[in-house]
Image (cartoon, rainbow, N blue to C red):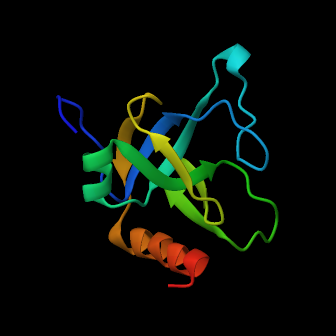
Amino acid sequence: MSGNIQYPDQGDLIWIDAEPHAGHEYGGHDSKNHNIRRPMLVVSSDKYNHRTGMVVGFPITSRIPNHFPASLKISSNNIHGYAILTNLLGYDFCARNGEIVDHIPNNIKVRSLDAIKDIFDL
């Protein structure tokens, strides 16, 4: 992609406009109150993100049901919550007003990539 846009790298934590959502997608934010932003853990490769302007990642939520097995605790300076490791989402980073806010440690990134291996039986 061209221009002066900084696209995220794998392992970045971002905010992105995630509404409207439908079906089984994670959402529930209220666009009437201008609450459409969702934190997300980027798991797509740097090359993919930079070439396409798209990002793929796990949504981050503030609350997880008791004993929900497929989540990863995220605790950074800017985002706290749980990455939902059962739901890969894809977004256009620019069209969805993406903003890079932090980066996770390598050990957390490895655990998130292991979840992708489980999803696709790699």
Residue 24 at x, y = what percent?
Answer: 77, 50
Residue 81 at x, y = what percent?
Answer: 60, 52
**In this rendering, would 102 be left or right of 25?**
left
Q: Residue at x 32, y 46 (%)?
A: 52
Observer able to see residue 73: yes
Residue nearest the observer in this picture, 73 or 113: 113
Observer able to see residue 77: no
Is residue 71 shown above or below 29? below
Q: Residue at x 43, y 43 (%)?
A: 14
Residue 115 at x, y = what percent?
Answer: 55, 75
Residue 104 at x, y = what percent?
Answer: 38, 59
Most extreme residue toward the right, as rendered?
66
Q: Name the image quarter holding the N terminus.
A: top left
Q: Residue at x 45, y 73 (%)?
A: 113
**In this rendering, would 120 be left or right of 29?**
left
Q: Residue at x 60, y 75 (%)?
A: 119
Most extreme residue toward the top, as rendered?
32
Residue 71 appears in which quarter of the rendering? bottom right
Residue 3 appears in which quarter of the rendering? top left
Count of numbered labels shown in the rendering: 0
Residue nearest the observer in this picture, 20 or 111: 20
Residue 42 appears in which quarter of the rendering? bottom left
**In this rendering, would 107 be left or right of 112?**
left
